[in-house]
Amino acid sequence: MKKMYRVFVSSTYEDLKEERIAVMRTLVSMGCLPVGMEYFEAADESTTQYIEKQIDTCDFYLLIVAGRYGTTIECEKEISYTEHEYDYAARHNIPIFAFIHSSIETLPFGKVQYGKLKELNTFKNKVSEKNIARWRDIPSLVDTVRSSMYAAMETYDHLGYVFDNRTDISIPLTQNFSNREVADRILASRKTYIFGLGCTYLIRTLEDRLMNDPKLECPDLKILLMQTGDSAEKIARKRAGWNEQEKKDFYTQTDEIIQKLQGNNAIQRKAPVTKDKQDSKEQKTDPPTSCLIELRHIETLPPYNMFIFDPDEEKLGEIIVHIAGWKTPSDNGRPALHLYKSNNAFWFKYFLDQFNRMWNFAEGQKE
């Protein structure tokens, strides 16, 4: 039996656009329906009345606070729309989950409302009387939102909309993720599988970050790329809209970068956490060891790029699939599938099986 939860996402807007997009993507991937100002339509009633009616329809209230207090309500100069939303949710006993930025002094100028710091701090003190979580950047915000919402679904299992005639929540379709977003998720995992044409920009991003930040740890990687120099590469170039000479070394550069990473003993991998250590309050890990990076090639044209994170983990297992297009730029305009093992088990297994079959085929290149 599957459920869908409505989650009201409350925050200041202009300074947290990217954070709101990331959080809403995460909620959708978990089978939730985010509700926020982005989707509000013009209404005859006052703005506050409309907002209150939207909050009434939601199972959870999610608050994101950074460096701005926000726009104050015209008839109530002393309170912002965000604080009004929070107070309304609190009065009506809607479960509240608040995420407060850990250090606003690190935020860029323009994202801190210095003229309203007193009001902001008073608001944060009020919010801090309940359970809160801290965040410092988008990846940490997404991680805390995801873990908090999974806990909420278990705690408030009487809430939500039941879909008892569905065997699985359909896979959310979204725009494809940037190389930076994928690299962030790779570096946050203990094991990642990568499959695609070449992923040169992504691999180069990983190399730059690992080489320039010795504190970063690399997960174990299985990288499955298209074999270059045959008809599949020619079709791939036509599909991308390249001529024969354009980006001539695009795919071979990927191999060279991966070989460089394989030969660099300074790159360390995340040590696995055993069940005993997971149960321990200290959650100590073994010292990191050399990163295990495996590379194979397959003599076929991939229909998509696929990234599988922590495939063995029930709660952390995640897959991103970027759909290929004919002469379509590799930007955020292409569609992507985003699913989690925890709530899309069937399709997670489907794509994981696809990778494993291609990985095994690539070893011998024959059925």
Image (cartoon, grey):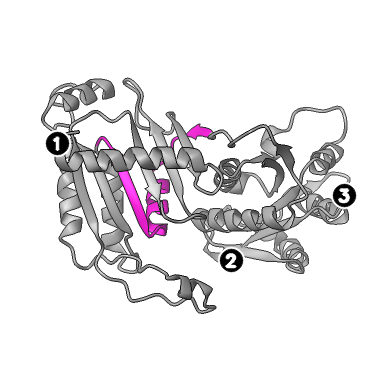
Whether residue 204 sits left or right of residue 166 in the image: it is left
Q: Secondary structure at mark 1?
A: loop
Q: Is residue 176 magenta?
A: yes
Residue for point 82% across, 28% down:
43
- For label 3, count other residues whose C-alpha is less than 10 Å away and answer few (under 14), some (14-19) or many (20+): few
What amino acid does circle 2 point to? Ser
Residue 177, visible in the rendered structure = no
Q: Secondary structure at mark 2?
A: loop
- For label 1, count other residues whose C-alpha is less than 10 Å away and answer few (under 14), some (14-19) or many (20+): few
Residue designated by label 1: 249
What amino acid does circle 3 point to? Glu
Whether residue 269 sits left or right of residue 31 in the image: it is left
Residue for point 68% across, 64% down:
132
Alpha carbon distance from label 2 to label 1: 44 Å
Q: Is residue 189 above or below residue 321?
A: below
> Residue 295 or 209: which is nearer the viewer?
295
Residue designated by label 3: 76
> Residue 70 or 56: which is nearer the viewer?
56
Disc nearest the viewer among 2 and 3: 2
Q: Which mark is residue 102?
A: 2
> Residue 310 or 91: which is nearer the viewer?
310
Mark closest to the chain's N terminus, 3 or 1: 3
Q: Residue furthest left?
A: 229
Give the extent of the magenta segment. Answer: 173-197
Alpha carbon distance from label 3 to label 1: 62 Å
What percent of the width, then of the height, locates residue 261? Answer: 20, 57
Figure quadrant of residue 135: bottom right
Alpha carbon distance from label 2 to label 3: 29 Å
Asked whether disc 2 touches disc 1, contact meaning CB atoms under 8 Å apart, the reply is: no
What percent of the width, then of the height, locates residue 152? Answer: 69, 56
Q: Is residue 331 above or below residue 193?
A: above
